[in-house]
């Protein structure tokens, strides 16, 4: 299985579309900054030592702890909340600030293989080998890497499912072990590889995987203000007024029948197109009609976790 | 596996029978119009841009959102409510309005394969490849497609079963992933392919599949008026009177013993034939006798979903 | 797998034994007449059009509905209530009335195959192909079939088990789909094939199969009068008196210890032989002794369905 | 797989040991007589017709019912109650009365095969074929069989497990069907083969198998009188007195700690040897010591059925 | 698979270590004597006949029952209570008394094979064949065997798991049947083979296996007196006093936190070594410290059976 | 499979890093001393005999018990409590005190193999063979081993899962047996091999494995004092004050929302790096900000065991 099969795609950043995507993500500043900083320090560890020299007496043991951690980050949260969009785009900012290329490797779900004995283990090991090779080719004399790598594992629960689950298939378990090994080796060798796992089933992640995470970022559905922002952008050019946008923000929030509002995707992939299609081909967009459509539409229900909702504010960052 | 095996049938529309079927569907005007419009815009995206130019200032961002969506539509609802009939016939209307051929590809359930490792994944990928090939052959110089494609996935839950289900077979999960990939690729390349999934188990659809749906249409059993309409049409030519039809409409509705009325199929495939057979060979059809037969017959029970009935009015359209 | 293996037996009707069996079935007149009429109209569809011409103004749309239905009939009910006996014998009456040969194909349970991938699907498809071939060989110039076919699927739940069942094997599910396809194709081509499914587990039938049924006939245990009738016939020639038969009818009914009476088979295969064997070799049959034996014997318990008993009177006919 | 593997053993009766075993079975007279009569009539059906002629007016329809039944008998009951001993020995009495050889074929549990696809079905079909061959070789000109066959299926639940059980293996189900076919064919051809199934899990027998049984005999643990009888025989020659035997009968019955007494095997295989071994090598058997040993010993607990105990008196004979 | 693989080891008794082990077992005199006597009579059955002649009038039927039993003994009880130690050592006493060699064959758990179809059955059959061959080689002209065989099946529940368990694997079930066959054949041929099964899950033994047991011996944890005895022996040579041993006996018994005391192994494999290690390298053993260590240590919890504890006193001996 | 695959790594101790790791472990003195002593006595058993001669009269039987035990130690406890760190580093102290090399063999999880029949059994047997070979090569003339071996089995529950678990795979069960065999053989031959199993699921360990353990050490999360100690070390060099460290110790303890404090890893791998990253690149570390970050972070939840928490104080040491 070659790289084309192990990875859905390998994207070379920065690229203009990615930078735009990154900037379009609203309400996620804390996570954006954290991911960028972390990856920056992976690419150029000297920056942290310089900072230490400037501000403290001697080298903090803390820097050792910092460097010894696996550079694994978990982006968890409901469907349509921007996890994958952030994971796929923050590398652009890193590339811009560090002035190096950042390569995004998106692991293919087919890396689970076809169930043959040992296959998943082999595929995952091979995927880690490839990103490590990509690093070593780029490392300069000064220890500074000429390239940053982001290894993206979307729908990570599919790969790193909890070994607590009684029914877990032996083969899968072996694959989780290979994944853990990959994460640990990357940490041990202090490679400039940020490993990003996205999941909407945080509880399903293997505890041994989750424990290794340097941070778990939890994503939530857009707030009222965020919803209005998205809709305003989408409908600019029509005669829909600000008070009508306010009503749209209201209509897409929590309601008696559902204790959750619209996701980002609900807004852009379902509501806005329905509004367009309703007007097409004879009428222009109109606020009143848009509000009516929004009220009739129901948001995507949250992915069922064990009745447990975690808030963004107090997360494991 | 060749096309004959991947697809139950490939129908070239318009055809007279299909147009008749489409017109015979009553009470579904909203869904009919929506599906026709959506597919029309897939075949000729220029129409939407023209509409925008005519009605708004500059190009709406909304058009981007519109075009970026997967053109996936889910037709959900109880047995015998007309889902499949609509899915198989609306292409006729598209063909008529767009003055192009529309090819309906009905995915065979045998595309699940025989359980061999990787087989379902291969078959589904191959099915998507075939419809994409069919498109590319027909695309003209002007970006306008010379042909519309409808990819029909009936009993979609069999293919796109929720990955939440603990017992889900590894092989099936891989197939769902292939399906998601197919849907996403079709969207990314903005191909004139409308993907229609029919299911009577909406809750069993994989959330990642369902989230991609541009719209979910929910179908219900016929109302009293619709039932009378169907029976009147069926029995025209006999001496059954309008008050007798009213009684038949009553007798085929909800009753103390069952909280649901007759389905469309209950009316046309079970009640009407029983009435005929009862009179044959010696007597003409008679209202009193028909009512008696209707009262003795029980409607098909709804497909068991988790005690959850969704109404047509407030659906995810 | 040749015909001998796909089918338990292929019986050419009429035959004297079958006609006798048909006449011996008591208390089932409604079902008998319905099955005979249905099959008659399959063999010679012209009869229905003639009837229509004679009694109505123009061709009823109802005739279309009638002809478009799958000619699938489900005979459901407890063990020993005569389902299979009726299914195997009513073809004699059809043969007599239509003056054609009727061939009864009894599908073998071995058509489930041995669990190999795709096998059940192949076997069922092949079984349908054989009965269709048998039809086409016999069809005359006038569209009138020279032969009627009854395809009997006994213990149908074994083949058409509900896909709702979580544990359903993938292979079985594929086989159910093949069965549905066979039923649909037979209907679409309006072949003179009556498909009869017998089951004592109606609730276990796949909903998609059951929905296709033109009628579901439900069978019950014999009433007191029917029990006495059977016993009187069996014991005629002995000195057992009418009041003794009355007592026997009583003793074989519901009792404090069991809320159900004897089945037809309990009477003919267990009670009567026990009475005979008790007298043999030295004494003649005697009422008092027969009553004593009946009182000591317990009827076969009903097949466990989900605590749900349906009555004959208000069935889905 | 040859006969040596399909059958544990094939015994030619009468033999002296078997006749002794048969006579030693106490308290089972009703079952003994019934099994002997049934098998006698299978070997020489003329006997029944002669009886009819002698005692009734014309041929009873009852004789037809009698002859049409499967000659299948189920011996059900707790471990150690003599089921297998009776099944293995009653053929001696048949042989003696009918003055023919009776061959006892004891089906091997290995007839379940090794789980290979189709194997159990093949093995069971082959077993039935062998006993049928054995019959046909012996049938004389006069329809009277020169030989009786007893086909013994011990631990029948292992082969004929209820198809109600959700977890039933597909392969097993196919085997049960083959078994049913074998039983039915034997009945249809009216072969002189008595099929005896022994089980301690009556409820686990497939309903379709059980329904075919001409009779179900239920076996119980020995009563106090029977226990004393067995012990008296075993210990004759020692100085144990009749009052001591009475106490032993008491000590081996139901007790506060267990609601069931000793089985036949508990008495002969566990209690008596313990008494012997206790005295060996220095002392003679002594009543007081024997009673003490009996009191310390606990009977084998009944095989767990679903809390359901059926009595001998009112059985399905 | 040769003998080295079927059997963990084959030990030729007597050997000095084994005799010492046998003598060291305390509190098990009844079981020791019973096993020795039973095996003695298997090796030289003439002894029992001589005893009978000396003490009774004529040959007792009881001797027949005695000889006809399977010589199968089940040693059941909690971990660390001496089951296996007794099973492995009592043969020394037999060898000493009977003045013959006794060979101990310890069946390997690998006799379960690797799950291949039929393998477990073959392996177990082959194991029984080997011990039978070993007997036949040694049998003299006088019927007296020149050698005794003990076939030890430790952790017998792994091999003879109850067939009641719904989830039992078909393959395992076949193996249990092979085991039953082996036991029965050994009994039928009256071979001088004592079959000893050890288990800590008596309830998990197949009822058909358990019913064949000539005796079930149940083992319990040591009493206070037995615990003190073991500790006194272990610590003799130190200055630990008798009152301190009393306190140790107390500290190792039932306590508020656990309703069970120390097992034999808890004492010799965990407590005593901890006491030694605590003193090493600088101090001698001291009672006060030993008591403190005992109080901090917790006994091994009993193997979970279904809440059912059986006492030694009233066992099935 | 060669050594590189059976073992994650083979480390030759002492090495400077390991010694540092060993010394950095705080609050575990009792366990450290015990493991070192035990392994010391394995390498040079003469030490114990010398101790005995010096302090007692004659050789204690206790020494026999001591030497006969399997040298198996279980390190159990929550994630991040230092189990593996201790297991990997204590050999350095042994090497230092005994002045021999100590080789640490860390069994790879891939020793479970790929599920092929017999594979896990072979791999585990082979792993034990390799460590035994390593011993025999190093043993001198005087019986004193020139080398100590530590066989580390991390996540031991994965290999030695309880056979009580109903769903346990046959293959796994065979592997557990191989593991038990390896442990027993090592004990029987008194090899200088300390076997260390780490697990966070003590209850999941097979009882037969657990019973063999010479000691079970249970690890707990750090106490408040231990937390402050770790943080003080990490942040030394910054201006964070002692009262601020006290507040940090508070903020990382049990809280209303979680009944458990931070693990060692939570402190060093998550909290400290977050504090660093927060200050980087512009500010020095500051106590107030650190406390704020600690308060927003949540500790890793404990691995779910059956609601059962065991304390360090009263453990099975």
Image (cartoon, coloured by chain):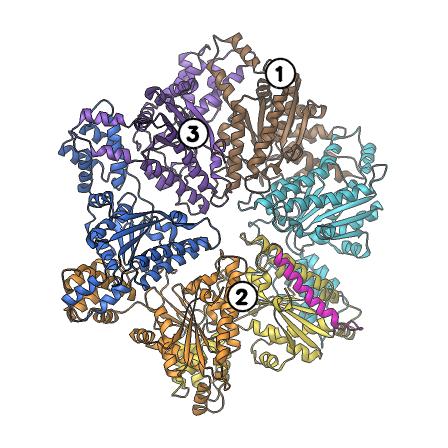
Chain colours: A brown, B cyan, C yellow, D orange, E blue, F purple
Please give the name of the residue rendered at 55% of the width and 42% of the height, measured from the top-left corner. A117
Q: Is disc 3 surrounded by few (<14), some (14 to 19) or many (20+) residues within 10 Å?
A: many
Q: Quadrant of residue F206?
A: top left
Let me know if marks 3 and 1 both belong to one chain.
Answer: no
The residue stretch that appears in magenta: C117-145
Q: Quadrant of residue C211?
A: bottom right
Q: Main secondary structure of the magenta part?
A: helix
**Rendered-image quadrant of the N terminus of chain A:** top right
Check disc 1 and report the residue beneath it: A140
Residue at the far front: name it: E141
User: What label sits on residue F105 in the rendered view?
Assistant: 3
Instruction: Give percent across and percent down for residue C67.
Output: 73, 66
In this view, C190 is above or below C223: above
In this view, E6 is above or below A140: below
Q: CA distance from mark 3 to mark 1?
A: 35 Å
Whether residue C183 appears in this view of the structure is yes
Q: Secondary structure at mark 3?
A: strand
Q: Are marks 1 and 2 in contact (CB under 8 Å)?
A: no
Please give the name of the residue rendered at 70% of the width and 45% of the height, measured from the top-left corner. B126
What chain does mark 1 sit on? A
């Amino acid at each position: 299985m070659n790289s084309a099969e192990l990875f859905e795609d390998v994207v070379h950043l920065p690229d203009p579309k990615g930078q735009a995507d990154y900037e379009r993500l609203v309400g996620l500043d804390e996570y954006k900054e954290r991911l960028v900083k972390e990856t920056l320090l992976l690419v150029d560890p000297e920056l942290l030592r310089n900072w230490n020299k400037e501000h403290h007496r001697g080298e903090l043991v803390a820097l050792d702890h910092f460097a010894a951690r696996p550079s694994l980050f978990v982006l968890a949260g409901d469907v349509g909340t921007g996890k994958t969009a952030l994971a796929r785009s923050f590398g652009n900012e890193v590339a811009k600030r560090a002035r190096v290329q950042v390569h995004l490797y998106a692991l293919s779900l087919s890396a689970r293989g076809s169930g043959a004995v040992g296959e998943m283990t082999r595929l995952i090991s091979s995927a880690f080998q490839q990103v490590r090779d990509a690093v070593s080719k780029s490392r300069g004399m000064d220890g500074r890497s000429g390239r940053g790598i982001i290894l993206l594992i979307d729908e990570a629960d599919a790969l790193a499912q909890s070994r607590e689950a009684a029914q877990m298939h032996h083969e899968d378990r072996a694959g989780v072990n290979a994944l853990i090994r990959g994460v640990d080796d990357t940490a041990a060798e202090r490679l400039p590889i940020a490993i990003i796992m996205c999941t909407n089933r945080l509880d399903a992640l293997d505890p041994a995987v989750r424990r290794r995470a340097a941070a778990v970022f939890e994503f939530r559905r857009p707030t009222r203000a965020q919803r209005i922002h998205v809709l305003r952008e989408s409908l600019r050019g029509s005669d829909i007024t600000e008070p009508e946008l306010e009503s749209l923000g209201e209509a897409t929030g929590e309601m008696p029948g559902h204790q959750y509002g619209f996701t980002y995707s609900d807004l852009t992939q379902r509501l806005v197109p329905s509004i367009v299609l309703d007007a097409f081909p004879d009428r222009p967009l109109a606020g009143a009609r848009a509000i009516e459509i929004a009220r009739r539409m129901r948001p995507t229900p949250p992915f069922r976790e064990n009745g447990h909702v975690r808030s963004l504010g107090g997360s494991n960052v």
